[in-house]
Amino acid sequence: MTCATRIAFTLALATTALVAGTLAQSQPPARYGLGRPATGDEIRARDIDVMPDGRGLPPGRGTVAEGAAVYAARCASCHGKDGEGASAERLVGRNEGDSFAFATNPKLVRTVGSYWPYATTLFDYTQRAMPFQRPGTLVPNETYAVVAYLLFQNGIVKEDAVMDQATLPKVVMPAHGRFVVDDRKGGRAIK
Amino acid sequence: MKSSRISRRRALAAGTAGIVGAALPASARQNPDTTKVQGPPGREVGARSPFEKPVRTAFSPARTATFTPLQDLDGIITPSDLHFERHHGGVPAVDPQQYSLLIHGMVERPTIFTLAELKRFPGRSMIRFIECSGNGGRAYRLTTPTAELTPQQTDGLTSTSEWTGVPLATLLREVGASPKARWLLAEGMDAAVMTRSVPIEMANDDALIAYGQNGEALRPEQGYPVRLMLPGVEGNASVKWLRRIEVADQPFMTREETSKYTDPLPDGTARMFSLVMDAKSLITEPSYPDKLEGHGWLEVRGLAWSGRGRITRVEVSTDGGKSWQNATLDEPVLPKCHTRFRLPWQWNGGEAVLMSRATDETGYVQPTTAELMKVRGPNTQYHFNNIRAWQVGADGVVRLAGGAA
């Protein structure tokens, strides 16, 4: 092999390798094959969320009266005897005419009854993060009950209401329909 | 141009005690001539000069938020131990060996990833800010003509880091997310089991499942070992200590995105999923509690950022907004990232009002307080990106000036 031929041959090899290498790396694979399948038990252990249409609500039920007892034992020390707020935020109260002028009137009370648009959110949040010092320790019946109690205290359900998988998603909150999607898009407009 | 013209009374404002020299090692005080004594050898982990004592401050005993000392920092990167904190259930101690991320819902293959597996995916690093959407409320609601508030106290809930991780889009492709998916839920493993819904477009854009911060593992208070990082988006949505992602067809309407982190508007509605942070800037030097000493040149410095892309211009006014000059922007000017701006200024000893105004690549111009208040109302709750002003008194004392400027 002459010197020139050898160089040409080497170049050809290098080019081939380069092309092959480029091809191998230009397209990422559809999958890398990492991770392992999650089992149903593993998903159920973490999947605690509840959606506005009721998806995710566990079996169980609770009444206003039962909820009053749960509230007194587990919630009142931070949120006040009647949900009026103490070291933790106020939960109970409506504004005159269910005013939603929160941007302009600092005197309006912001509570479950005046500002929360979905009753299911109250269940979801109470179940995952309350009571503050022992989060996630209420069983579903206790959570349904305390949600029923707070909805009653806010004048949203009647005293004989029972909350469960069927009834809770049907509760229409006073603040429902007050929320709008974000219309900011950048550009010159100040919104 | 020496900053020695600005006397720093900052140690006192930050609440750190007493005379700086008192905290120095005895050798530093007794041997001022460093050329006549050997210095100490190298150490396994470095520490700041004992002369430098920047601290995060909290404004409530519960310390559920701590604020970055913006006035003490140069450049755009926030030292990791000074990155602001906001948590709703404290900082969990997560063992990386026990950690796993579950992705399920509208996916072909519900999957569990260990930390080691997440790190095997092609990664990406990017320098991006995170700002809490409640940042700046103090400046927005200021009712007095001036206030003795530092940049840290008004706006210390913003920080910038280099974040490293795997693009969320890669993981969504790996598990086979349904083309019908519209939203996903991100859930943390703190005591709040924090949850936020994220639009799928945002997840497939530049969202990162981050495990690195400024070249090392995430700090515990930033989500160790794994957090969601949504560039340009209000900090609360970048869920820390991430344990689960559920892919769905609609938002989950969690407590944080309904009863909190929504913006009441003057028309009697409230804006939901107002995720992107609009352009904002802030002069960090001079600022309270600086006192300008002597007339002459100094440099006005600050930070600008936008959740919608790059900062294209920062203007500075030294006369309360009557006239504006373009500031210099330090390279690199990155999208959705703090950008350092500078403008030399000659103080003649009189009263002055310093302001900065940012423009981003969409053409959005940072509004005055009056402009923002007109469209948001005085009692709105989040997203306070109005222009900040600093009043320099004839005596050189700098104070936060009325938000209505």
Image (cartoon, coloured by chain):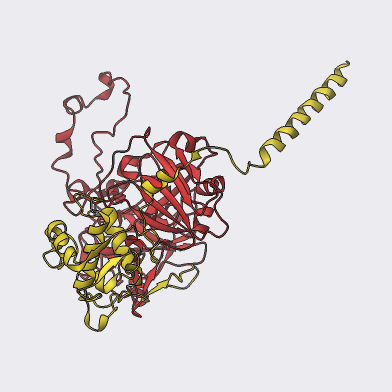
* Residue drawn at x 44%, y 58% as measured from the top left: B198
Tell me residue A46's x, y (percent): 37, 48
Left or right for B36, reference B319: left
* Residue drawn at x 31%, y 49% as measured from the top left: B84
Tell me residue B139's x, y (percent): 27, 64
Residue that lies at the very extreme toward the top in this rendered image: A1
Instruction: Name the quadrant containing residue B255.
Output: bottom left
Q: Quadrant of the C terminus of chain B?
A: bottom left
Q: Depth check: give the residue in front, B107 or B397.
A: B107
**Please, is residue A6 above or below residue B330 in the view?**
above
Left or right for B268, reference A36: left
Tell me residue B339's x, y (percent): 43, 52
**Please, is residue B47 above or below residue A152 in the view?**
above
Instruction: Name the quadrant containing residue B389.
Output: bottom left
* Residue drawn at x 33%, y 53% as measured from the top left: B194
Tell me residue B111's x, y (percent): 49, 43
Is residue B75 visible in this depiction of the protein?
A: no
Left or right for B122, reference A70: right
Q: Depth check: give the residue in front, B394 or B69.
A: B69
Say which chain is red.
B
Is residue B118 visible in this depiction of the protein?
A: yes
Q: Depth check: give the residue in front, B108 or B316.
A: B108
Say which chain is yellow.
A
* Residue drawn at x 42%, y 47% as measured from the top left: A43
Residue that lies at the very extreme toward the bottom in this rendered image: A97
State the count of labels. Answer: 0
